[in-house]
Image (cartoon, rainbow, N blue to C red):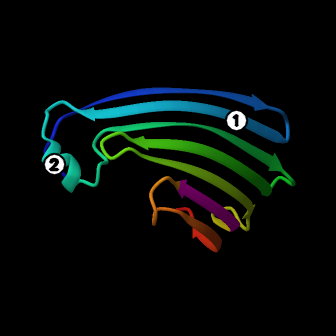
Amino acid sequence: LTNRFFLQKNFESSVALNTAKNTLLFRVFHRTRKPLDNRPLLDVTLGGQSHLKQEGVGVLLSHRITNRTRLNANFLYRRLHFRTISRRDKIWLYSLSVTRELTEHIFGALRYRRRNRTSNRIGNQYVENRFTASVAMRF
């Protein structure tokens, strides 16, 4: 949390292809953020996250199995560069889910997600595997 002013530049582009049963979405993005003031002590106390460059690509495929069931696959690759502390991270995200409309207002989902983060700094690497099952009601 900070009261600093930042200059953030974003570029994002996406293309979607639709058929009767499939939706395919491609996405690319590039983002830079830097503080407008020169306070290096704040940069260190904020963990070097104030001057950031982020870029990546993503692909999403959604396939309609039946009128009430969908299979979704997602891939995202992101590169992060924290310029203040010369830290470079790479994140790979894969997810697979099945969603089902159980009734008109109740939906169920099974999801698997894997996130892999590598870094040039020791201690910032991790691998996450997550399985979730959910039921939601829409009013």
Question: Secondary structure beneath disc 2?
Answer: helix
Q: Is residue 112 magenta?
A: yes
Please tell me whether mark 2 or mark 1 is closer to you in this view.
2
Left or right, 8 with reference to 76: left
Left or right, 48 with reference to 129: left
Q: Three-letter amino acid code at disc 2? A: Leu
Question: Secondary structure beneath disc 1?
Answer: strand
Q: Main secondary structure of the magenta part?
A: strand
User: Residue 138: image x %, image y %?
Assistant: 56, 62
Tell me the residue at 31%/38% (across/down): 51
Find residue 104 and report its image quarter: bottom right
User: Residue 87: image x %, image y %?
Assistant: 41, 48
Q: Pointer 2 and pointer 1: residues touching (CB < 8 Å)?
A: no
Find residue 20 and report its image quarter: top right
Q: How many marks?
A: 2
Comes first in the chain, label 2 or label 1? 1
User: Residue 77: image x %, image y %?
Assistant: 62, 44
Label number found at residue 97: none
Q: Nearer the viewer, residue 8 or 125?
A: 125
Q: Nearer the viewer, residue 93 or 70?
A: 93
Quadrant in which the N terminus is drawn = bottom left
Find residue 126 and report its image quarter: bottom right
Tell me the residue at 28%/33% (across/down): 34
Q: Three-letter amino acid code at disc 1? A: Leu
Tell me the residue at 46%/63% (across/down): 122
Q: Which residue is mark 1?
A: 25
Q: Which residue is mark 2?
A: 42
Above or below, comparing residue 126 to residue 24 in the picture: below
Q: Which residues are magenta?
A: 110-118
User: Residue 86: image x %, image y %?
Assistant: 38, 44
Left or right, 94 with reference to 48: right
